[in-house]
Amino acid sequence: MCIFITAVVPAEVDLKKSQALLQEHGMRFKSLENPHLQGQIEGAQYLCATGAICECSTVLGSNTEGRAREDRKQEFQHEIEKLRRKGWSQQKIERSLADKTNAANRDIDSAKAKHEAELTNWCNFIHAFLAQPGTPTLGLLLHMYSGGLATERIRIKRFEKLRVSGKLPSMLTAMENDVLYTFTKAKGA
């Protein structure tokens, strides 16, 4: 099972005119046909956004720092119980956990820097894509696939229409699976 990012654009959008922009931002926008989804997005093009094999580590929908901290807390609680069963002293357990915490913090800092770069790229791409003539909207959908992109039974939970604003980074990290987020230009843009 993997998360994939797919895009939805109006049928009249000519993606050939956007190829340089897509390449600049690492996007692919390869056409997909999924009969389970097509009926929910009538009159739109359904596209594989990046062409990546797996996007489980994407910044979209991540809220990474909070998720990583919660995962680490659960992992450490399990580790403490295991070490106590082995007869370790409280002081030895605390030293071991301090070492592991330091290593985990370095990993989180590295992942955070990578996610910040990815988030900046997504924001820049969305702004640039919507600034092109003839591209009034850009839809993004996250879905945890258990089957093929063309055969997965996807049911969109809800449709969210969002104006691009200074809150775009937080909008992107707060995305939920199976919600189609349709971005439009900010007023006056």
Image (cartoon, rainbow, N blue to C red):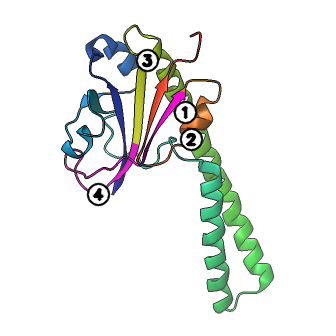
Residue 179 appears anywhere in the view: yes
Query: Label 4's element?
Result: loop
Pointer 4 or 3: first along the chain: 3
Q: Is residue 120 or residue 10 the one in the foreground? A: 10
Range covered by the magenta-colored residues: 142-162
Instruction: Bin the neighbour count of mark 1 within 10 Å (Cα to Cα): few under 14, some 14-19, many 20 and up.
Output: many
Q: Residue at x 71, y 87 (%)?
A: 88
Q: Position of residue 56 (x, y in %)?
A: 42, 49
Mark 4 and mark 2 residues within 8 Å of each other at the beta carbon = no
Question: What is the CA distance from the residue labelled 4 to the residue labelled 1?
Answer: 26 Å
Measure the C-alpha gap from mark 4 to mark 2.
Answer: 23 Å
**Hey, which quadrant is residue 34 in on the image?**
top left
Q: Amino acid at mark 4?
A: Ser
Q: What residue is shown with label 4?
A: 146
Q: CA distance from mark 3 to mark 2?
A: 19 Å
Q: Is residue 159 magenta?
A: yes
Q: Is residue 114 visible?
A: no
Q: Residue at x 48, y 23 (%)?
A: 126
Query: Which mark, residue 119?
Result: 1
Query: Marks 2 and 1: which is nearer the front?
Result: 2
Place of residue 75 in the rendered image (x, y in percent of width and height, measured from the top left): 60, 71
Which residue is at 66% across, 65% downward? 100
| Above or below for 99 versus 78 | above
Type of the residue with mark 2: Thr
Quarter that holds the N terminus: bottom left
Residue denoted by label 3: 129
Disc marking residue 173: 2
Sequence-wise first label, 4 or 2: 4
Q: Quarter of the image for the C terminus: give it.
A: top right
| In front: label 1 or label 3 | 3
